[in-house]
Image (tube, rainbow, N blue to C red):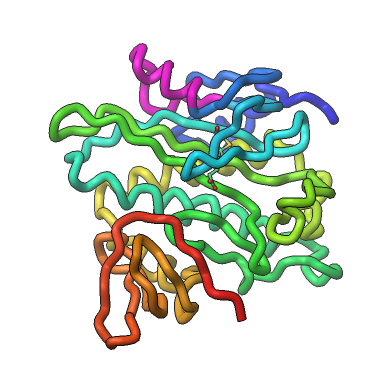
Amino acid sequence: MRPLDARAIERELARLGASLGSPLSVAAETASTNDDARSAAAAGAPHGAAFLADAQTQGRGRGGRSWHSPPGENLYLSVVLRPSLPASSVAPIALVMGLAVASVVERRLASSARLDAPGGGSLAEVRLKWPNDVLVGGRKLAGILVEAQLRGDSVSSVIVGVGLNVHTSRFPPELSARATSLAMLGIDGLPREVLAAELLQALGDAAARFEAGRLAPFAEDLARMDWLRDRRVEVAGVAGVAAGIDAEGHLLVRGADGVLRAVAAGEVSVASG
Ligand code: BTN
């Protein structure tokens, strides 16, 4: 597989007028692009500084899980954000970053001539599993790791790391039943550089809209893309049926007692069947 071409990403970013991606660092291999972005942010990297790698040796997911990061196949991208927000308002940015990634995927699937290919995706299938897994056809296409650095009541930086499965055609056995890639959805031959630029543009736009209007501008998309809605879930000790996402970005769960509870954070397990 051809290594990532930093110049091609820069050309695409300029063409799209993206607000993120400068400065841009592209490594052949790194431990974790989120770690690279975090160290750079601690050393003063500006809003928009982006870190990509062709492979990660210690790619991280939420909850301390590892992220499958083989060389040359997929996108591993992290960006430094410096939003002007009070610390108390920053958490829902994780949801908004998920929506931004989902919107790029949705557009690409919509413009794919092979939308009806066997196993292919469809517009209706791109969903966000709270807080920010991007699923197509119920399988995970992209994962997002958001790590905020707070200084007192203000936000010093937010690192947004995106892992998007692009060319992978076979996942390890432990992932094969629940993961997918753009190639498996019928989108092949799309340069990773183009996708990287589209992701950075979408993340930048979403971050700016969130800073201006918090979750309000995203309410419709959050409801439309909510994969958990009406599924039986258990999260943070709360069990019941998922009933949407509130204005603070909390997951609403209706218990067997009929009471609606709002969950701020946690890993959701979904009952099968
Ligand atoms: C998850 O679904 O648990 C989040 C996965 C996030 C993976 C990306 S890949 C780029 C960045 N670097 C990391 O180490 N993790 C994120």
| Nearest to the observer: residue 43 or residue 173 | 173
| Farthest top residue in view | 43
Q: Which residues are magenta?
A: 35-51
| Nearest to the observer: residue 203 or residue 227 | 227
Q: Is residue 224 left or right of residue 143?
A: left
Q: Residue at x 44, y 48 (%)?
A: 97
Q: Quadrant of the N terminus?
A: top right
| Farthest left residue in view | 153
Q: Residue at x 38, y 17 (%)?
A: 45
Q: Is residue 106 left or right of residue 122?
A: left
- Dividing the image into four equal quarters, which quarter contains ligand 1? top right
Where residue 9 sits in the image (x, y, percent)? Answer: 64, 29
- Residue 181 visible to an observer of this rendering: no
Q: Residue at x 62, y 37 (%)?
A: 196
- Is the residue 210 above or below the residue 33 in the image? below
- Residue 216 visible to an observer of this rendering: yes
| Total tally of numbered discs in the picture | 0
- Is the residue 190 above or below the residue 82 in the image? below
Where residue 221 sits in the image (x, y, percent)? Answer: 43, 67
Where residue 134 sits in the image (x, y, percent)? Answer: 56, 57
Q: Quadrant of the C terminus?
A: bottom right
Q: Is residue 179 left or right of residue 61?
A: right
The image quarter containing residue 194 is top right
Q: Residue at x 45, y 72 (%)?
A: 233
Where residue 172 sits in the image (x, y, percent)? Answer: 78, 46
The image quarter containing residue 218 is bottom left
- Is the residue 263 above or below the residue 214 in the image? below
- Is the residue 47 above or below the residue 165 in the image? above
Task: Decide whether residue 234 is among the magenta residues.
Answer: no
